[in-house]
Amino acid sequence: MQFASVEFGIFFLLVLGIYYLVNQRRRWMVLLAASMVFCGHSSPWHFIYLMIAISVSFFAAKIIEKLHEDEARELFHKKDISREEKKKLKNHFKKKKQWVIGVLLFLLLTVILALKLAKKLSLIQEGALGILIPLGISYYTLVMIGYCIDVYREKYPADSNFFKFTLTIMYFPSLLQGPINRVDALREQLFQEIHWNYFEVKAGLQRAVWGLFKKLVIADRLAIFVNQIYGDFGNQAGSFLAVGTIAYAIQLYADFSGYMDIAIGISRTFGVKLAENFKCPYFSVSISEFWKKWHITLGDWFKDYLMFPFAMSQTGRNIGKQGQRIFGKQGGKKLTLYLATMLVWFSTGLWHGIEWNFITWGGVYGVIMVLSDFLDPLFEKIRNRWGITKEKRWFRFFCYIRTFSIVCLADILFRAPGLREAVIIIKKILFEFQVSAIENTEIWLLQLTEQDYVVLVICLIAGLLVHILHQKRKSVSVILEQRNVVTRWMVYFGITWIIILFGIYGSGYSLEGFAYMQF
């Protein structure tokens, strides 16, 4: 059930109506039933697998909590034992809890790796992917792992209600493509008393409509153009491949952020605010800043559950000590940080897929992050020598272009069929750049009309203006609320009619799935 489908629209409006008609204390049950229907609609296998995974996570957390209680009870009854004996007792329980976490990680991650490996080796037929590979599996798996680790860290107690826990994992607005929720933050909202709030519901619907606009009018129209170029990359000039790559970067952002707008918007109508996943990423002066603004919840998850634990682990500390002997105190700390960074980016590449292009993509970003930090003092000296400050507008604009260019080149690894094809495309862009090829109007108009390009230009300008306002921390929704009622509703109806008139859908067209749903 695609977010950008009439079927989902009807489903959502029915759920919303029932949600506000029932008693406040039972509203979470409406969301649970809706989430189960939404999940089961994709395939019975998806629903069965998710229920098994939720059950395993629920009972793993309960076992860990029981071990916490047993440890506290043992320590209370053995107050007079020596410090060494207390340490042994704590280590005994710590190993048991870590064993539970290890089994959970093995079970959940093995399923993902096995399914992705089967896909890579063509052991699963393309037509069966939606049935045999549960949609969004990588997203909710991270949520469940994070939850059990938080219980292990005693950040909060394990859930005692299985059905409420099921809802926090299966909550349908964020089930398939995120954002990657933190269980404590989500359950705090799902089970509170929600009152009907016209302005919240309206703001949520506005956000969802904006997401549909980005998906149907911009992303899916650009997808036709990008698919045309990448589908025949061997016969395309480097300049046209560069144009296609820039188009893909915009398509990917409009698609993924459009999904998030819809997810966050429809969730807001239920009185639940999901975490933001984008903050104008293409207005970034560095790759580091870009990844603090793109897929924010994924980056935060890897930072909290992989990067910091590795850096603070015994292995990480030992590496730091060895590094200090060779590179000095500061160098030793940096060595641990750099290895942790590379581990995170290698894992991020694997999270997207076990193909070499994804692994290389993660490695490239890891190297860029490490080199950026390592060379920053040198760059700072060069800027000071030439009197260049980061506040200068021309320098910030240069940094925006530089960051966007790097992201586009890395996106080739993401979009190309494989690593070999990505290398060919990059070589063509760098060494076979023919400006004259762009002037060939026949290539431009193979699958899109002149009207399509006019619509794209106008809509991209509108989207850019909205992003500039967001960059300046100005909300379009708030600005509209300050206008008179006629102006507001003209804008609402206007963007709705644009989606209806210029959205890519209808007879003879298969709705493009959201780009990140494959992960």
Image (cartoon, rainbow, N blue to C red):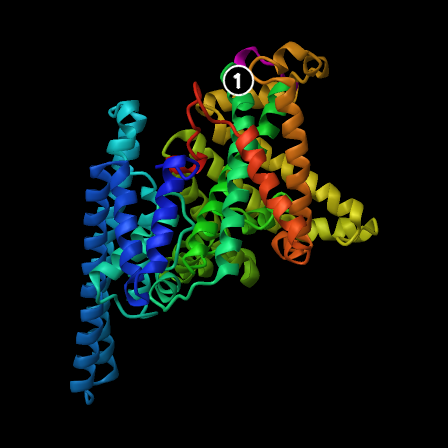
* Residue that numbered label 1 is attached to: 228
Instruction: Judge whether 314 appears above or below 397 on screen.
Output: below
Q: Can residue 351 be seen?
A: no
Residue range corresponding to the magenta coloring: 233-239
Q: Residue at x 49, y 53 (%)?
A: 204
Q: Residue at x 52, y 22 (%)?
A: 224
Mark count: 1
Task: From the top left corner, tell me how far across and down residue 36 is, in percent.
Answer: 25, 48
Task: From the top left corner, tell me how far across and down residue 243 is, in percent.
Answer: 63, 24
For label 1, count other residues whose C-alpha is less than 10 Å away and answer few (under 14), some (14-19) or many (20+): some
**Prevailing secondary structure of the magenta residues:** helix
Q: On the picture, is 80 further left or further right than 152?
A: left
Task: From the top left corner, tell me how far across and down residue 1 is, in percent.
Answer: 34, 37
Q: On the picture, is 72 further left or further right than 407?
A: left
Q: Residue at x 62, y 43 (%)?
A: 282
Task: From the top left corner, tell me how far across and down residue 148 is, in percent.
Answer: 28, 60
Q: On the picture, is 86 further left or further right than 415?
A: left
* Residue 467 included in the magenta stretch of the image: no
107 vs 498, nearest the viewer: 498
Q: Can residue 428 be seen?
A: yes
